[in-house]
Image (cartoon, rainbow, N blue to C red):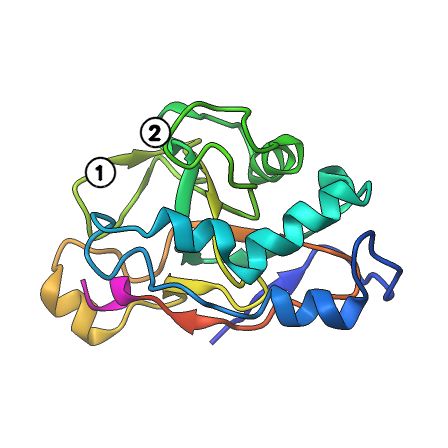
């Protein structure tokens, strides 16, 4: 399977608020239940706020770290999970690069909502006229979801690459291959891994 690809090769650098190794650990550690376990109905916001990922971001900002200095990593034909900090159906962008740029500009508190104090570290973009997902939403071209995810260096992946036979049996209308493009923002020197499957892989 094709895995994630970084937008560019970036050598390890000093990171405001932490070492590269500390950032790598914090941004690969998942302390809370997956938000998709109960269909996003029982997200533990307090746990997310206290998670190693959010605590790392807050320390990074306090030390003078800039959201815009994070490195963009893209994963073609993949849909990453997370909790929305900007609703994709009403956040249209012309390209995935513009979607990534919005995540690079987004700061906690920018957009009202239950998770408005969380940073953006994941984005999911629909580049086609329609993008299939196993849920009730009708995704169309330009949808740009900005999300917060625990462990963005080890993201929860809903679907990636060619859809499995099991998915096609559950959803005969599904296309043969994932139509979304996803990405994460990480500090220089922290690598994006293939991640883990989210509960949505079985929807």
Q: Is residue 202 magenta?
A: yes
Instruction: Return the mark for residue 184.
Output: none
Q: Magenta residues: mostly which secondary structure?
A: helix
Residue 3 at x, y percent in the picture: 54, 70
Q: Residue at x 34, y 66 (%)?
A: 198
Q: Is residue 184 magenta?
A: no
Q: Quadrant of residue 55?
A: bottom right
> In this figure, which residue is indicated by the disc labeled 1?
137
Q: Are marks 2 and 1 in contact (CB under 8 Å)?
A: yes
> In this figure, which residue is indicated by the disc labeled 2?
89
Left or right of 147, for residue 153:
right
Q: Which residues are magenta?
A: 199-203
Residue 124 at x, y percent in the picture: 46, 45
- Binning the other alpha carbons within 10 Å of mark 2 as few (below 14), some (14 to 19) or many (20 upward) gives some
- Binning the other alpha carbons within 10 Å of mark 1 as few (below 14), some (14 to 19) or many (20 upward) gives few
Q: Residue at x 48, y 54 (%)?
A: 149
Q: Earlier in the sequence, mark 2 or mark 1?
A: 2
Residue 10 can be seen in this image? yes
**In front here: 93 or 108?**
108
Left or right of 191, for residue 106:
left
Q: Quadrant of residue 156?
A: bottom left
Residue 139 at x, y percent in the picture: 30, 37
**In front here: 30 or 7?**
30
**In front here: 106 or 74?**
106
Left or right of 97, for residue 175:
left
């Amino acid at each position: 399977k094709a895995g994630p690809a970084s937008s560019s090769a970036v050598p390890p650098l000093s990171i405001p608020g932490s070492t590269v190794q500390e950032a790598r650990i914090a941004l690969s550690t998942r302390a809370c239940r997956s938000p998709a376990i109960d269909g996003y109905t029982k997200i533990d916001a307090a746990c997310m706020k206290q998670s190693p990922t959010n605590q790392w971001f807050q320390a990074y900002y306090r030390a003078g770290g800039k959201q815009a200095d994070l490195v963009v990593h893209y994963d073609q034909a993949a849909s990453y999970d997370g909790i929305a900090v900007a609703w994709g159906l009403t956040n249209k962008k012309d390209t995935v690069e513009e979607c990534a740029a919005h995540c690079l500009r987004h700061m906690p508190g920018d957009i009202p909502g239950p998770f408005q104090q969380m940073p953006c570290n994941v984005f999911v973009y629909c580049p086609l006229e329609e993008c299939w997902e196993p849920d009730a939403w009708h995704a169309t071209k330009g949808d740009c979801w900005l999300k917060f995810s625990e462990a963005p260096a080890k993201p929860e992946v809903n679907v990636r690459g060619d859809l499995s036979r099991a998915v096609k049996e559950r959803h005969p209308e599904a296309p043969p291959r994932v139509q979304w493009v996803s990405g994460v923002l990480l500090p220089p020197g922290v690598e994006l891994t293939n991640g883990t499957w989210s509960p949505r892989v079985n929807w």
